[in-house]
């Protein structure tokens, strides 16, 4: 699950903030995590934390974020929140995988070396497969190839090394499936033809998403802080239009808004200005704070939960565990349609916002399927 370098770490809007009851400092024991491992190799400069939230459904899978955290406490808070988020994403995606995540503390442009990455790989190996790593902010497929020289538990490697390559391909495909499901739920028809869709951020995921939308004859409006990215996309797809920034985009008459840039896209101001009746995009952590999901509901906006619709990337890299086959991974990512529809229907029937329904479904799967581990099996 390659998360872009511009995502806003440390994550501020994941579902829980794990703090010690006696102070505001993050506390591993104040959380519900199974295991938190601190890894230190002085010579290479490696300082990493691996957090496993849950292995109820299988080994924990989640990326390694390489980021210059202001403090070790910030790094701990981030990895605890991110690993919990992965457990929910993997559970809802129907994967037999638990949730984990790792952070390497430091500026990757300054301290990333072969020795540091390999030292990190050796620590991943010590967990014996309880945690599989992948790309995240500050780590890329070639880094995974290096880590894999020391560890058997690495995904997100380059295609040349048997990896799944660029995960944004199926992330975008999954978001597109989520949009079709949202359209079905709200308008009784999966078709996006003629619908006006605003895409904020046309980076790796956004540009593939635009391709799917144009192919279906949607009217696409885009924006990006990177003018070159917009210009290149407009050359590829002459039918699309662009606006100056995200503020302008959300005020455009839209049917669907797809945040595909940074987290926190849905905040108190943006949702009041939004004209779209569906929000479905790739960005992680779209809800800026708790309570926003209720306001979206009150405004009659159908919100397809971010971690539900953007799970195509983790589905893509998880397929490496079976020997990567793109067609099989794509078939699995197609199930995001049914999952999104299921989330929206459950939200309606239980009278809760879709983000709450998604959490309930993920927790239910972890509980019900995870419980089966209590049935003793003889070892062969
Ligand atoms: N790549 C994946 O497989 C994947 C998987 C799951 C979730 N996501 C999430 O999807 C989002 C996009 O990921 P990506 O891989 O395409 O990243 P990316 O870095 O390739 O693209 C992000 C784009 O957003 C633009 N952008 C940044 N700030 C902006 C702003 N204020 N307004 C408009 N545009 C802005 C950037 O210029 C860039 O073109 C991220 O939130 C990421 O966490 C990505």
Image (spheres, rainbow, N blue to C red):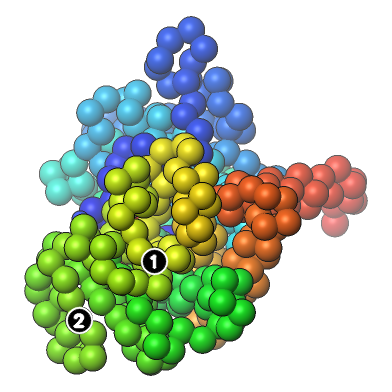
Residue 121: x and y in percent read 40, 48
Nearer to us in this view, 292 or 63: 292
Looking at the image, residue 348 sits to the left or right of residue 62; the answer is right
- The number of numbered badges drawn on the structure is 2
Q: Residue furthest top?
A: 22
Q: Dot 2 surroundings within 10 Å: few (below 14), some, or many (20 or more)? A: some
The reply to whether the residue tagged 2 has its Cβ within 8 angstroms of ligand 1 is no
The answer to whether residue 129 shows anywhere in this view is no
Tell me the CA gap for discs 2 and 1: 17 Å
Nearer to us in this view, 269 or 230: 269
Q: Quadrant of ligand 1?
A: bottom left
Nearer to us in this view, 205 or 41: 205
On the rendered image, what quadrant is the C terminus found in? Answer: bottom right
Kindly identify which residue carries mark 1: 276
Residue 75: x and y in percent read 34, 32
Residue lying at 27% horizontally and 25% vertically, measured from the top left: 71
Residue lying at 23% horizontally and 53% vertically, measured from the top left: 6
Residue 307: x and y in percent read 50, 56
The reply to whether the residue tagged 1 has its Cβ within 8 angstroms of ligand 1 is no
The answer to whether mark 2 and mark 1 are in CB contact below 8 A is: no
Kindly identify which residue carries mark 2: 241
Secondary element at image label 2: strand
Residue lying at 49% horizontally and 15% vertically, measured from the top left: 20
Which tag, 2 or 1, sits closer to the chain's start? 2
Residue lying at 45% horizontally and 43% vertically, measured from the top left: 292
Please name which of the two marks, 2 or 1, marks the residue nearer to the observer: 1
Looking at the image, residue 348 sits to the left or right of residue 379; the answer is left
The answer to whether residue 302 shows anywhere in this view is yes
On the rendered image, what quadrant is the N terminus found in? Answer: bottom left
Q: Does residue 99 sit above or below 74 in this rendering?
A: below
Instruction: Using the rendered view, name the quadrant where residue 166 is placed.
Output: bottom left
């Amino acid at each position: 699950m390659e998360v872009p370098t511009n995502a806003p770490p440390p994550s501020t809007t994941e579902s829980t903030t794990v703090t010690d009851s006696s102070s505001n400092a993050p506390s591993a024991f104040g959380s519900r995590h199974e295991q938190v491992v601190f890894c230190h190799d002085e010579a290479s400069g490696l300082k990493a934390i691996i957090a496993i939230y849950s292995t109820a459904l299988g080994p924990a899978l989640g990326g390694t974020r390489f980021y210059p955290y202001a403090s070790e406490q910030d790094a701990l808070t981030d990895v605890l929140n991110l690993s919990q988020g992965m457990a929910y994403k993997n559970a809802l995606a129907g994967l037999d995988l638990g949730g984990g995540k790792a952070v390497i503390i430091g500026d990757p442009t300054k301290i990333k070396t072969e020795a540091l990455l390999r030292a990190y790989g050796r620590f991943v190996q010590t967990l014996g497969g309880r945690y599989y790593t992948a790309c995240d902010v500050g780590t890329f497929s070639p880094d995974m190839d290096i880590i894999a020289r020391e560890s058997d538990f690495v995904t997100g490697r380059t295609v040349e090394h048997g990896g799944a390559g660029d995960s944004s391909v199926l992330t975008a495909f999954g978001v597109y499936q989520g949009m079709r499901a949202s359209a079905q739920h709200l308008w009784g028809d999966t078709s996006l033809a003629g619908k006006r869709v605003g895409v904020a951020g046309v980076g790796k995921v956004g540009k593939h998403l635009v391709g799917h939308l144009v192919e279906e004859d949607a009217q696409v409006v885009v924006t990006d802080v990177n003018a070159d990215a917009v210009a290149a996309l407009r050359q590829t797809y002459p039918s699309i239009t662009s606006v100056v920034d995200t503020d302008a985009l959300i005020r455009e008459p839209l049917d669907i808004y797809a945040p595909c840039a940074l987290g926190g896209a849905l905040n108190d101001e943006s949702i009041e200005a939004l004209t779209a009746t569906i929000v479905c995009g790739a960005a992680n952590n779209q809800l800026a704070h708790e309570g926003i999901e209720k306001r979206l509901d009150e405004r009659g906006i159908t919100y397809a939960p971010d971690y539900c619709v953007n799970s195509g990337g983790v589905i893509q890299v998880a397929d490496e565990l079976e020997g990567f086959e793109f067609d099989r991974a794509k078939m699995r990512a197609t199930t995001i349609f049914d999952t999104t529809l299921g989330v929206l229907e459950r939200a309606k029937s239980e009278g809760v916002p879709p983000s709450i329904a998604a959490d309930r479904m993920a927790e239910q799967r972890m509980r019900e399927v995870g419980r089966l581990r209590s049935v003793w099996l003889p070892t062969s």
